[in-house]
Image: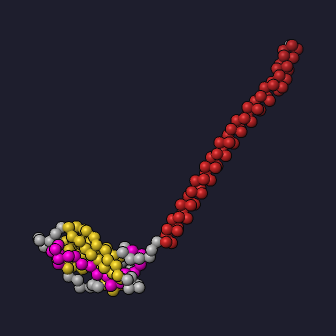
Amino acid sequence: MNEGVLFVKECIQDVALYAMPIAAFLLSVLALIKSNKIKKMEEKLNEYDLKLKKYELEKIEQEKNKKNEACIEARIVKISGDKYRIKIWNSGTATAYNVDYDIPDEYQIILMKRVTPFEILEPGHNFEEHVIIHMQSENKYKVITSWQDKDGNDFNKEQLKTW
């Protein structure tokens, strides 16, 4: 039994002398590899973070540089049966003044024009007027909108639409 105890004691000493340092060395190599991977991942994360911040700053700059102007649009909409209206709206970011619209005679659409020129049209607001469409009216038409900005500069927009 003493020989067995001595053998176990020598095995424990050999393991402590040789196997433990080798195991510790292998564990430290693994830790070094993992820490390098983490470092690379952190560098990529920082790079993406910088790109995101740059994108957000560019977006903010674009919003600041975005022109504050009106954009008047129009479209004929069917109300019921054979009743139609033309809807005119300001899709821009500034107030439009003296808003008017026109559809050339060649499309044979009769415009009632009871409220135009519309003196002030705020962004996001609209107004409607009656139009008469008959059998000779074209399904496709051009609508020309015109307006002024607060400084009195004239603008117009020509659109091709269908009803």
| Residue 108 percent coordinates (x, y) | 15, 74
Where does the magenta region start and end? 92-110
Left or right, residue 59 beside residue 149: right
| Residue 9 percent coordinates (x, y) | 85, 20
Left or right, residue 96 beside residue 10: left
Q: Nearer the viewer, residue 55 or 113?
A: 55
Decide whether residue 52 is among the magenta residues: no
Please tell me in which quadrant of the rendered image residue 75 appears.
bottom left
Residue 4, placed above or below residue 141: above
| Residue 131 percent coordinates (x, y) | 20, 77
Left or right, residue 134 beside residue 52: left
Residue at image x 67%, y 46%?
A: 39
Residue at image x 57%, y 57%?
A: 51
Residue at image x 71%, y 39%?
A: 32
Q: Quadrant of the N terminus?
A: top right
Q: Nearer the viewer, residue 63 or 153?
A: 153
